[in-house]
Amino acid sequence: MATPKGKVSKARRNARRSAHWKLSMPGIVKCPRCGKMKLSHHVCKACGYYDGQKIVEVEEAK
């Protein structure tokens, strides 16, 4: 059975875990219909389309 060779200090332990909280950049792509930026695999907030189909009715800006 594997056992640790020695004590891992709090600083070394915390340094190893320090990168776990970082978030990756969300997948942002251009909407093929209106050209606005949107999250991939999500309905476009500007035009309401997803995969070429109207999903959500969007009010036009005044």
Image (tube, grey):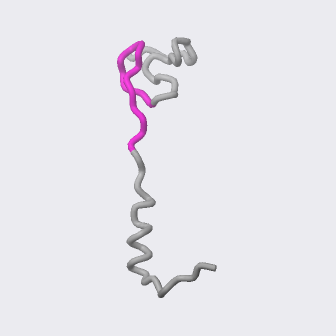
- Residue 35: quarter of image: top left
**Region rendered in magenta:** 25-39
Choose between 43 and 3: the one closer to the eye: 3
Q: Residue furthest right?
A: 1
Query: Residue at 47% of width from left, 87% of height from top?
Result: 6
* Above or below 4: residue 30: above
Choose between 16 and 55: the one closer to the eye: 16
Q: Is residue 34 magenta?
A: yes
Choose between 18 and 55: the one closer to the eye: 18
Check the picture and name the quadrant holding the C terminus. Answer: top left
Choose between 2 and 57: the one closer to the eye: 2
- Residue 18: quarter of image: bottom left
Count of all numbered marks drawn on residues in the image? 0
- Is the magenta region chiefly helix, strand or loop? loop
Check the picture and name the quadrant holding the N terminus. Answer: bottom right
* Above or below 26: residue 48: above
* Residue 27 point in image, percent of width and height: 42, 35
Query: Residue at 42% of width from left, 73% of height from top?
Result: 14
Q: Is residue 32 magenta?
A: yes
Query: Residue at 40% of width from left, 61% of height from top?
Result: 19
